[in-house]
């Protein structure tokens, strides 16, 4: 899953990136509003963490522009403006969640997970498919109860496919949601990850749909 | 009202004084003139009678005098009629008298007259009345110097004068009242715009208007415009203060957030104790910042009369926010608030009060939160119910203590409820916690209501 962090305070941004990477996300960060708006408008993210007090373009303006343009990416507003008036304004502008600074890191991660899950249509924190259970809260994968060790990239690929369980995900989409922007992408590596996943899981839940992409579904 | 009344009173009393003085002086002058005129008339009459008498007076060669032609006025023949004549010889007063004198003799004072002079004397009449006598000296051959006089009762003259005086007094009194009314009317009319202005100001204080509305005369309109500009300026200043408070928040909270994150990182690296210290102190600083901001916001609210917001719009905004914030829970938030309920205060404060209370209700609720409001005279009565576990009587008291969290498991700053309590206090409202018929907690709120009237510059653009 790929997250965009729009935050102008560098140290905080760095802390957020660390936090999110440790939780298994691919993260892009940007420090000014206009760039943030542009990235959110053009790149596919699973969620955006948006500060409001940004240079070049205010967070509320960014949010309104995204929504007006039809971008439905879940946005969690993370801001010092914590009054209820600000919350109502932010949520009315199109935010999906609103967290005031300072915040508990655990709370931020939990809310982010819930956002990502909800937007993918997954109501429960646990996504199961044919014996494979993805616990989004703990960021762990089990197969028939047994824990499976995955690299961060493998985890991301599996998590994305399982969030979109039952849907064919084109390889390009998978690539976009698994790598951060500045990562050197090689189109073959997705196949490598899929191969490794199949081996580690042991259960055939990842299907290749020729010419279209990959899909996670119940084993036949 | 006192100042305005004394100004009016002063103007009216001043006019009354001037009118009284003028009418008094005029009345005196008129009385004088009238009296003189009446007296002159009387004297002319007496003079005529005397002329007639003199013309009819003749002396016989033996020295006796007689009136050969009687005087025409019948009053001379009627006893004690009030009109008399008398001829005095040098050695005998009352030698000849009119029949009206009967047996009374007028006693003229000693006087030296030249032949052509007329003299006037007040004399006493037969029945003790005051008379005005006119005399003349004539020298008749053989008779000597005679004093010839005619006298008339002044009582009539006095009666006429008195009657005139009374009529004059009455009519001048009426005139005076009329003049006073005419003087008072413009004063009252001129001051009426001031009273209208006071009423317009009262509307602003009560919250049903946020600028002075109405037509005012040319002289007052600049004042009205200035006042409205001042009110708008105040509103702008409050706004600026809020923005500054918001900047302060941004300035402090981000560093606090960074510190909180470092605390987490420290904890992960194994320095749990240090991490806990940092986390606690960060929480204290955060609470202070929140508290100061809430105070500044509330203090600003008190300065601004005439601010108001539509309650249903405000609570609905909060409700929409909560639906998203608690999206996982699938809560039902019911709202029953009349359209004409207006909160007399800033929208931000209204949202802060209901945001905290409804957020709390949502956190604890099983599945349902209900908000009902109604207008009770000068107040809004709002009730918030949830179907959660509720609070015991002791807990209900404890919950308002600053920073006190009843259940660590439910995330959120315990400061929220004390912010609500402080805001409610500043708005001179009331808040009570009791058991809810839904099973959980009921919050009863009493807040100042604004009258639903014409919108003004201070209304939140809903």
Image: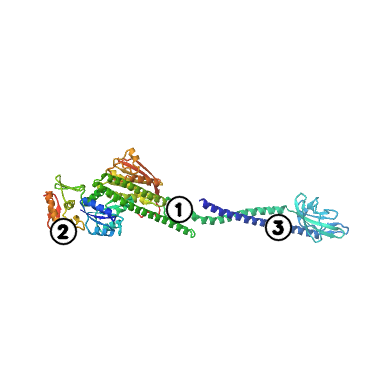
Task: Report the side of A16 relative to B9 (left or right).
Answer: left
Answer whether labels 2 and 1 touch (C-beta < 8 Å). Answer: no
Asked whether B36 or B226 is in front, the reply is B226
Residue B245: where, in percent of width, then height? 36, 53
Residue bearing mark 1: B201
Name the colour scheme. rainbow
Residue bearing mark 2: A186
Residue A22: where, in percent of width, then height? 21, 50
Answer whether labels 2 and 3 touch (C-beta < 8 Å). Answer: no
Asked whether A52 or B276 is in front, the reply is B276
Task: Report the side of B22 relative to B444 (left or right).
Answer: right
Answer yes or no: is residue B312 visible.
Answer: no
Answer yes or no: is residue B169 visible.
Answer: yes
SS under mark 3: helix
Whether marks 2 and 3 lie on the same chain: no
SS under mark 2: loop
Residue A105: where, in percent of width, then height? 26, 49
Distance from Cα at disc 2 to Cα at disc 3: 133 Å
Residue bearing mark 3: B36
Distance from Cα at disc 2 to Cα at disc 1: 73 Å
Task: Report the side of A165 relative to B74 (left or right).
Answer: left
């Amino acid at each position: 899953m790929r997250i965009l962090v729009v935050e102008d305070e560098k140290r905080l941004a760095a802390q957020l990136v660390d936090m999110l990477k440790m939780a298994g996300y691919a993260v892009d960060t940007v420090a000014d509003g206009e760039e943030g708006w542009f990235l959110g408008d053009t790149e596919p993210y699973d969620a955006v963490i948006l500060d409001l007090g940004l240079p070049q373009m205010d967070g509320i303006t960014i949010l309104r522009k995204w929504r007006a343009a039809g971008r439905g990416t879940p946005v969690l507003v993370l801001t010092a403006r914590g009054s209820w008036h600000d919350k109502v304004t932010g949520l009315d502008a199109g935010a999906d969640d609103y967290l005031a600074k300072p915040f508990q890191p655990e709370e931020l991660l939990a809310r982010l997970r819930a956002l990502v899950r909800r937007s993918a249509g997954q109501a429960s924190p646990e996504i199961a498919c044919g014996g494979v259970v993805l616990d989004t809260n703990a960021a762990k994968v089990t197969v028939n109860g047994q824990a499976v060790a995955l690299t961060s990239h493998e985890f991301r690929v599996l998590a994305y496919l399982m969030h979109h369980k039952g849907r064919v995900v084109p390889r390009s989409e998978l690539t976009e949601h698994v790598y951060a922007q500045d990562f050197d992408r090689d189109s073959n590596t997705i196949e490598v990850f899929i191969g490794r996943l199949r081996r580690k899981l042991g259960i055939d839940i990842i299907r290749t749909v020729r010419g279209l992409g990959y899909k996670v579904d119940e084993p036949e | 009202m006192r100042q305005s009344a004394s100004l009016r009173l002063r103007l009216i009393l001043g006019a009354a004084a001037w009118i009284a003085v003028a009418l008094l002086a005029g009345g005196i002058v008129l009385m004088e003139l009238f009296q003189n005129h009446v007296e002159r008339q009387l004297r002319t009459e007496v003079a005529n009678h005397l002329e007639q008498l003199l013309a009819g007076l003749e002396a016989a060669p033996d020295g006796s005098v007689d009136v050969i032609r009687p005087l025409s006025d019948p009053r001379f023949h009627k006893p004690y009629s009030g009109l008399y004549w008398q001829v005095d010889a040098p050695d005998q007063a009352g030698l000849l008298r009119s029949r009206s004198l009967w047996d009374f003799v007028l006693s003229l004072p000693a006087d030296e007259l030249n032949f052509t002079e007329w003299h006037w004397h007040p004399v006493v009449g037969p029945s003790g009345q005051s008379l005005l006598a006119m005399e003349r000296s004539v020298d008749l051959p053989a008779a000597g110097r005679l004093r010839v006089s005619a006298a008339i009762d002044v009582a009539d003259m006095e009666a006429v004068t008195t009657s005139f005086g009374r009529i004059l007094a009455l009519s001048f009194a009426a005139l005076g009242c009329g003049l006073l009314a005419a003087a008072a009317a413009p004063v009252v009319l001129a001051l009426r715009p001031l009273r209208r202005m006071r009423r317009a100001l009262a509307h602003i204080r009560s919250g049903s208007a946020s600028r002075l509305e109405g037509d005012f005369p040319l002289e007052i309109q600049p004042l009205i415009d200035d006042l409205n500009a001042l009110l708008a300026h105040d509103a702008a200043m409050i706004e600026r203060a809020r923005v500054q408070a918001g900047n302060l928040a941004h300035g402090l909270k981000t560093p606090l957030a960074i510190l909180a994150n470092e605390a987490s990182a420290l904890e992960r690296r194994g320095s749990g104790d240090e991490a806990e210290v940092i986390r606690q102190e960060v929480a204290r600083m955060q609470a202070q910042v929140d508290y100061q901001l809430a105070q500044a916001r509330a203090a600003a609210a008190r300065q601004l009369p005439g601010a108001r917001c539509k309650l249903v719009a405000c609570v609905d905004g909060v409700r929409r926010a909560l639906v998203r914030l608690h999206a996982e829970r699938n809560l039902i938030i019911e709202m029953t608030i009349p359209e004409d309920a207006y909160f007399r205060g800033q929208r931000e404060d209204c949202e802060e009060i209901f945001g905290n209370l409804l957020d709390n209700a949502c956190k604890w609720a099983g599945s349902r939160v209900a908000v009902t409001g109604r207008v009770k005279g000068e107040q809004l009565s709002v009730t918030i119910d949830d179907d959660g576990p509720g609070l015991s009587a002791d807990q209900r008291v404890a919950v308002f203590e600053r920073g006190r969290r009843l259940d660590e498991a439910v995330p959120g700053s315990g400061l929220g409820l004390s912010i609500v309590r402080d805001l409610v206090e500043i708005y001179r409202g009331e808040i009570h916690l009791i058991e809810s018929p839904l099973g959980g907690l009921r919050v009863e709120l009493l807040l100042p209501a604004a009258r639903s009237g014409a919108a003004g510059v201070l209304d939140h653009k809903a």
